[in-house]
Amino acid sequence: MDKQEFRKYAHQLVDWMADYLEEKEKYPVTPSVKPREIYDQLPSTAPDQGEDFEKIFQDFQEIIVPGMTHWQHPAFFGYFPANNSEPSILAEMLMSTLGAQCMSWLTSPAATELEECVCDWLRDAKGIDSTWKGVIHDTASTATLSAILTARERKSNWGINEKGFSGKEHYRIYSSSHVHSSIDKAIRIAGLGVDNLVRIEVDEEFAMIPEALEAAIQKDIDAGKTPLCVVSALGTTSSTAVDPIGKISEITQKFGIWHHIDAAFAGTALLLPEFQSLINGHEAADSYVFNPHKWMFTNFDCTVLFLKDPKDLVQTFSLTPEYLKTDLDKEVNNYRDWGIQLGRRFRALKLWFVIRSYGLNGIREKLRHHLMLTQKVVQWIHQTDDLEILAPVKFNTICFRQKLSSGDQNAENQFNEKWMAAVNETGKAFFSHTKLNGKYVIRWVIGQTDVTEKHIESAWVLLLETRQKLLQEI
Ligand code: PLP
């Protein structure tokens, strides 16, 4: 493709993108394709000769788009939002045009300094201690792994990095039984052994019980094991429960344990001052992660990891072969030393575009709108016979289910599963589920960039009509 053609097709694509954003509601939220249906439409070997872009773009529209789940559809209410926005998309376009590698200050000075700036902006806007420093990672999974590896190295005085495991360590990691699976994965990768993940009991709101945590730590110490790290959650994945961050920090401080706070999804709520008390006491913790790529109108991927003392992280990951050395290494920030990967994308640009375009107040207005819509749905559910909400609605996630007069939990679980599948099959809305205390619940998450009252009303009508049909079949 020559530069002339690039200009032509780029204009064509931008028109398609603008149309998509305007008309995304015309697509079914989830496609009705069967496994292998897309694969079978693709040639079995790569083309030897280059193809016309017209044809490639046509195939994108005819083969790929019909097989996509439309995460930006305002009636996508599943899992968590992965909302994007026009300024974020524009930044992504510029990022790929610049094609910069942002591994060190020298390889992209502006990218490094913009990253320092937007991390500081977000830290201050979220009420995180002003001495903490941030770094952008791809995902919360990677950021949490980095925090756990740093905790491991600090505890072993950077010995495991140097000499490997002696096989005798019994490092113990603690989290609530509702913590995200990325914690289990990080523990495996860090070589700590899944058996060393201690699941702490939760209260009736699915939040970690601090007394149970303290007792578990003491028990391990008495047994000659070494407590390493507590991972608390500000917004668990199933029900967005909030662990008592301050109390957990007191315990980790008392025992000299790393405290990592996983706020991947709900952390965006801290941009609203009324939520900031949830992290009271975090000053005594060590790290905090949240995903602008979930609820902050920033395209996937973009995660920010904040650290009380980045020195420990840098000591864990810093490795400078001759070919990466620069004269400025002592003066500047080389973000390649703040995580696992060497090569880094220019993600700060999209945060900069998003924050400047909306302004913090614009973002806050959107979040408050989501929270207001959520409370509307909560009221509807409360006013409807035989529906119940099984977890406190702290943010924008509602876990609800239908009860049956028989009270038979198996039958209720089957009913709710069938109910959600029937709604999702229409393609008019999409929900996902979890289980709380063995009960199947439908999760309704309201965080899409363009979601309005009209979308929640239509989804509610669809849910009620589908429920009615299924109840008649019983
Ligand atoms: N932690 C929590 C609480 C989450 O909800 C999620 C994603 O759902 C993650 C971690 C993992 O996030 P990522 O996909 O950025 O690794």
Image (cartoon, grey):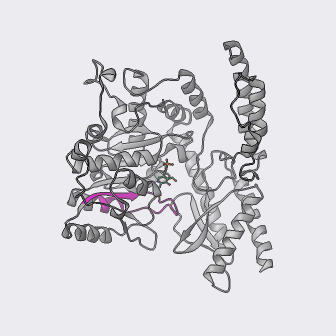
Give left or right: position of 160 versus 200: left
| Image coordinates for residue 53, horizontal then vertical, percent | 74, 24
Q: Residue 170: which quarter of the image?
A: bottom left
Quadrant of the frame with the N terminus: top right
Range of residues picked out in magenta: 227-249
Give left or right: position of 33 versus 197: right
- Residue 161, compared with residue 438, is above or below; it is above
How many numbered marks, from 0 up?
0
- Residue situated in front as seen by the camera: 57 or 177: 57
Q: Is residue 290 visible?
A: no
Task: Please check the rendered image and state whether residue 231 is part of the magenta-colored stretch, yes or no.
Answer: yes
Quadrant of the frame with the C terminus: bottom right
Task: Please check the rendered image and state whether residue 255 is part of the magenta-colored stretch, yes or no.
Answer: no
For the point 77% across and 41% down, the residue is 41
For the point 61% across and 38% down, the residue is 85
| Image coordinates for residue 368, horizontal then vertical, percent | 56, 51
| Image coordinates for residue 318, horizontal then vertical, percent | 29, 34
Give left or right: position of 384 versus 241: right
